[in-house]
């Protein structure tokens, strides 16, 4: 069974074609700058060659045409005909409290995803465009499945997901913590249990998805009991351009002083804060690290703040879990920033964490393994996340039961 996995953004579209029987990736690529004159598709051929083509993509339907053409390209394509695609799995960012698992897409599901768009205005509309474009390009008979970023987190208890604001805002607008990156946290939770040779139902884990967007999740007996991101992906600790959680009065104070609208303030917190806002250099950690190495004090401060905040959340989740069996680092920075992992784990020595610093220093660019020393009280693991594989597995399971 060949499954096409789709991650549609507002101006981008990532895809992978996966043989769900042996979980082999047959093709992968992305469409960038959809809706602009500079739109292009980049993809890897079955032989590993990288191809980039500039093409007209005024909307997501045209982007899927480009994906289709790449998949069946006579020279570089991974398949000969679109009929080889058995099903399509979509990453959908916000499923609210309604969706606690992946589902087959139908008109009711499409309606619900649209209803949750106010909670993810940059993501859900793009996800819907991807679903609609797929139906046009691949045909309505090809089953489509929605896999929600928020689903894994729906086991959180009320004491964790509620905010201490008037209860009516929860009743009227659904204002609560939803959490994100759930597909990634779910993948590494299962993988960590497999690595440790134990059932996830017997483990207390803290999973750290750290990239340009970041979140940490506390998983007890296979179920999420808390996570850092909140109503939106802005919550938690500082990220590439996001501020993370802060004193709400900071928002009203700055808005008053600068005479800013809600949209302008939201742009500052989402697009101009985090590593970029503190360092004044970049949201890309590679640039910040380079500047820090040259003695830039604001770049150094940005990193000090980030490491401290991550360690604080891990410490708080240690308490929430009543102990911890394992900590996982994953995603872009989690997988490729040895300094971050070492500095965070230095804070955690009080919990009995001991690092294998020699292995940690060389663990990047696809290297995974155990980061903790043999006598560490908590196992620390580096696991490469694979959200696309989770989407493919869920899609296969749902389609096989039709």
Image (cartoon, helix red, strand yellow):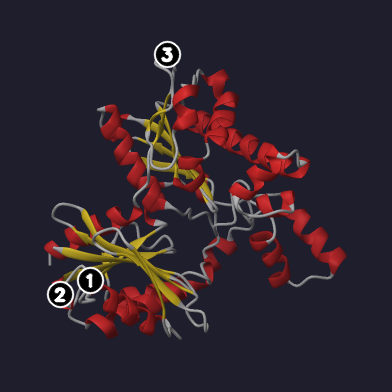
Residue 36 shown left or right of residue 42 in the figure: right
Q: Quadrant of the C terminus?
A: bottom left
Quarter of the N terminus within the rendering: bottom left
State the residue position of label 3.
Answer: 375
Q: Total label count? A: 3
Disc 1 marks which residue?
Answer: 77
**Picture layout, residue 152 above or below residue 254:** above
> Residue 380, located in which quarter of the rendered image?
top left
Foreground tag (1 vs 3): 1
Dot placed on the residue nearer the N-terminal end, 3 or 2: 2
Camera-nearest residue between 295 and 62:
295
Q: Residue placed at 58% from the left, 58% from the top?
A: 167
Image coordinates of residue 89 in percent, x first then y, are 28, 66
Name the residue that disc number 2 marks: 80
Q: Secondary structure at mark 1?
A: loop
Identify the mark at residue 357; answer none if there is no mark: none
């Amino acid at each position: 069974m060949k499954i096409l996995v789709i991650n549609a953004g507002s101006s981008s579209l990532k895809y992978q074609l996966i043989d769900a029987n042996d979980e082999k990736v047959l093709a992968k690529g992305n469409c960038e700058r959809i809706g602009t004159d500079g739109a292009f598709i980049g993809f890897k051929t079955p032989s590993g060659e990288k191809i980039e083509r500039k093409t007209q993509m005024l909307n997501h339907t045209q982007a899927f045409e480009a994906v289709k053409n790449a998949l069946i390209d006579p020279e570089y394509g991974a398949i000969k005909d679109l009929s080889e695609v058995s099903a399509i799995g979509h990453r959908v960012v916000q499923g609210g409290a309604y969706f606690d698992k992946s589902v087959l897409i139908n008109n009711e599901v499409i309606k619900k995803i649209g209803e949750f768009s106010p909670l993810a205005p940059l993501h859900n509309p793009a996800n819907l465009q991807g679903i609609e474009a797929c139906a046009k390009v691949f045909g309505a008979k090809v089953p489509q499945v929605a896999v929600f970023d928020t689903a894994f987190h729906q086991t959180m208890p009320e004491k964790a997901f509620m905010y201490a604001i008037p209860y009516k805002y929860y009743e009227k607008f659904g204002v609560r913590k939803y959490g994100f990156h759930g597909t990634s946290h779910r993948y590494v939770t299962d993988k960590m249990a497999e690595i440790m040779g134990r059932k996830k139902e017997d483990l207390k884990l803290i999973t750290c998805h750290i990239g340009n967007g970041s979140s940490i999740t506390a998983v007890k007996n296979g179920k999420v009991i808390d996570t850092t991101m909140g109503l939106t992906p802005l919550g938690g600790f500082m990220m590439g351009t996001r501020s993370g959680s802060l004193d709400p009065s900071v928002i009203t104070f700055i808005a008053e002083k600068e005479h800013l609208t809600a949209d302008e303030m939201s742009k500052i917190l989402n697009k101009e804060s985090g590593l970029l806002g503190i360092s004044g250099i970049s949201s890309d950690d590679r640039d910040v690290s380079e500047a820090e190495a040259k003695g830039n004090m604001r770049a150094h401060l940005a990193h000090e703040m980030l490491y401290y905040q991550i360690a604080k959340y891990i410490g708080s989740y240690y308490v929430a879990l009543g102990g911890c069996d394992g900590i996982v680092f994953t995603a872009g920075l989690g997988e490729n920033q040895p300094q971050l992992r070492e500095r965070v784990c230095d804070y955690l020595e009080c919990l009995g964490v001991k690092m294998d610093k020699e292995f940690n220093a060389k663990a990047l660019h696809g290297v995974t393994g155990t980061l903790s020393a043999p006598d560490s009280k908590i196992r620390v693991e580096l696991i490469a996340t694979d959200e696309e594989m989770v989407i493919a597995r869920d899609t296969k399971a749902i389609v096989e039961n039709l």
